[in-house]
Image (cartoon, rainbow, N blue to C red):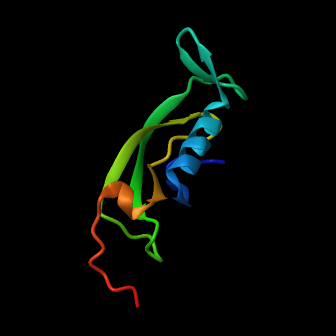
Amino acid sequence: MSMKGKDVTVFTSLSADEANKLLDDRQKSYEKTEDGYRCRTCGERIMQTTLYISIHIKEFKTCAGPGRVLTVNFPYCPNCEGEPRTARACVHVPQAEWGCSNDYDDR
């Protein structure tokens, strides 16, 4: 998948465990070498950018949450995928995990 110069949504509406598994599985495409990581497909050195992950509350019916955003390193192969302009995602976590009060009437 080419990401070069694009705004990329890496994943959406996943639980934190599903997101971690997706990112772990992605790393299987890379091989650790003495000077970092290399792409298993083309041998190019793996680069990284920032992945912005919005935290959303699972109990809400839409992508909504407390406004928190996590940043994590996001690896990519500059040859096979290209550098994305931005990389973003969202995870849906139970409200109790973030200590958010529910002042909303769910009607």
Q: Residue furthest right?
A: 41
Residue 61 visible in the current orientation: yes
Q: Is residue 100 above or below residue 11?
A: below
Query: Residue 103: percent from the left, percent from the top?
Result: 26, 78
Query: Residue 68: percent from the left, percent from the top?
Result: 31, 56
Give the residue displayed 57% in from the left and 40% down from the top: 23
Q: Residue furthest top?
A: 34
Q: Nearer the viewer, residue 37 or 71?
A: 71
The quadrant in which residue 43 appears is top right
Give the residue displayed 39% in from the left and 70% down from the top: 64
Give the residue displayed 70% in from the left and 27% down from the top: 42
Give the quarter of the figure containing the C terminus: bottom left
Instruction: Give the left or right position of residue 45, taking residue 68 as reference.
Output: right
Residue 6 visible in the current orientation: no
Label total for image: 0
Q: Nearer the viewer, residue 17 or 39?
A: 17
Instruction: Give the left or right position of residue 53, taking residue 45 as reference.
Output: left
Query: Residue 10: percent from the left, percent from the top?
Result: 54, 52
Query: Residue 69: percent from the left, percent from the top?
Result: 33, 53
The quadrant in which residue 96 appears is bottom left
Q: Residue furthest bottom?
A: 107
Give the residue displayed 57% in from the left and 21% down from the top: 37
Q: Nearer the viewer, residue 44 or 100?
A: 100
Q: Is residue 46 above or below residue 82?
A: above
